[in-house]
Structure formats: C-alpha cells, structure tokens
Amino acid sequence: MAETTTRASTQNSESAAAGPGRLETDRGTTSIAEVVVTKVAGIAAREVTGVHRLGSTVSRAIGAVTQRLQVGDASTQGVNVEVTESDARVSMSVIIDYGESIPNVAQAIRDNVVRRIEATTGLHCAAVDIAVTDLYFPGDDDEPDTATTAA
Amino acid sequence: MEQPGRGAPSPRLALAALARDTALAIDGVVALDAGIGGLFVTAGGGESVAGVRCLAAPEGGYDVALRLVCRLVALRVLADTVRQAVIAAATVAGFQLSTVTITIADVVDETA
C-alpha cells in the first residue's frame, strides 16, 4: 500500500485565537523543549481508542535498540515535532486496531493532540500529520508489516 | 598565601540553591535538569547546583535560568509560577534579579 498522509491545519482553537505565541515576559522567557511537546503528542495519541501503538515496525525496531542503549524513550517513538517560537507541527505514525474507522481515529488523534499540546504548552498546534502504518489484528503478537495506509 | 574571601559561600551559589529549592517546592516540578553533559550548572568553590545557571547581569543583579522536569500540567502557567516564586524568594533573601528564564526540559509521563 502506498503511503498517504493526511494533513489538517487546526485554526479553531481558543488558545490560538488568544494568540498565546510568545513565551516572553518582562522578567524572562519561558521555553519548552521539543521533547516535551513530542511526549505530550505521543501521550495524547495513545489516549485515543483504536490506537494500538505509535510508530512503524522500523521505528519501533530502532527504538528498541536505542532504549536498550538508554538513549531513546518509548513515549516519543513514532512522533516528530517541529517547534517554532509560537507554533508546533506534529507528524506521527500509528498502528490502528483492525475494525476501527481509520478516518475517525485519525481525526480523534488530531483533535486530542491539538487539545493537549495547546493546553499543556500554550503553543499553537498548526498541524498534525498522521500516517497510519498498519493495522493490528487481535492475536497478533508480532509486529505487523510496514505497509501504510491513508489516514 | 590565602586568597581573600576564599572559603566564603558564593552569593551566586546561594542564589542558585535558593532558586532550586524554591522551584522544587512548587507542585508540578519534579526535578531540575542539568542538560546535555550535565553542563547546565552553577558552580564555584568546589560546589555546584545542577539545573540552575546564575550569571551576573549587565545592569546589576543576576540573570537566573532554570531547566525543569515537570509533570504534565499547564506548563506556561507553571513556569510563570516558578518565575514569580523565585523572584519573591530571592528578593526576600536580598538578591536582585534581572531575569528568570525557565526552560521546560522534560516532562514525566505518569501514564506510562
């Protein structure tokens, strides 16, 4: 299956409308590391029903190695974040439970990730790109293949 | 020959320790982070305070920077709370602060 990625900008959040962008105050600045936003996004995605796990087979294999070397973190696996001064753009790969509506789960992921990032970090979440890398069938103990489908 | 002032507690270190203790006392702050290589410290006289950097500010007083590890709460609000608390504690202790820079270095995933 060819990989297709859905991109949806989110312009309707209250915090975005309030213009939370700048993290400067008159007595110093507040900055939030990318890994923080990455973790928030990963946790938010895992909260959604129908998400089996994050990451593709390849990224999880690499992640398993990096975790053994204690240089990786399971909560950031399969999630990439770009953070500018005021915006965050998230891309993530997910494996979804077979039988769930992929568009519905993808939208639920997107909504939850935006809500969590904006509530937790104050950053405007400009986009959440989701790649569904495979489906999980109950009883599958091994990692599924890396085939990717549209979100 | 003994150097003047040697052995006396460094005001910079005292301020760093005060900032660290103040930050850790705030609900939501789990730890301080010393950064890559553990270089984000205030050091002097053989002692160091990890996760806090105090530097003399050009206009007088000190610039204080903290790297925090936090729980998943509203991070900007928490950062503002830490900033205000550090300024208040430092003022009471007689320090003049110029800026307090807060970096949320990491969060603790309590759901994992």
Image: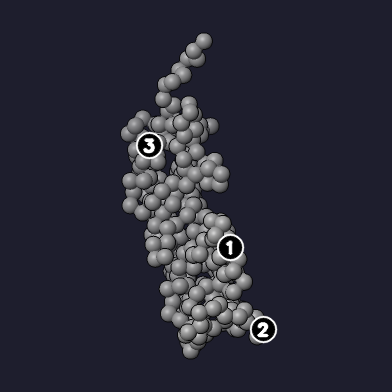
Q: Residue at x 54, y 60 (%)?
A: A67
Seen in the picture, residue B31 relative to B59 is either above or below; the reply is below
Taking B69 as reference, is A64 left or right?
Answer: right
Q: Is residue B10 above or below residue A22?
A: above
Q: Are marks 2 and 1 on the same chain?
A: yes
Q: Is residue B80 visible?
A: no
Instruction: Name the chain letter of the residue that bears numbered label 2.
Output: A
Where is residue A90 shown, x and y percent of the image? Answer: 56, 68
Q: Are marks 3 and 2 in contact (CB under 8 Å)?
A: no
Whether residue B41 is visible here, answered yes or no, is yes
Give the numbered dot on residue A65: 1
Spatial CA distance of label 3 from label 1 is 40 Å
Chain to which the residue tagged by mark 1 belongs: A
SS label for mark 1: helix
Which of pointers 3 and 1 indicates the residue nearer the eye?
1
Considering the image in quadrants, where does the C terminus of chain A appear? bottom right
Corner quadrant of residue B111: bottom left
Q: Nearer the viewer, residue B37 or A120?
A: B37
Q: Does label 2 or label 1 sit earlier along the sequence?
A: 2
Q: Chain of mark 3?
A: B
Which of the two discs, 3 and 2, sits closer to the camera?
Answer: 2
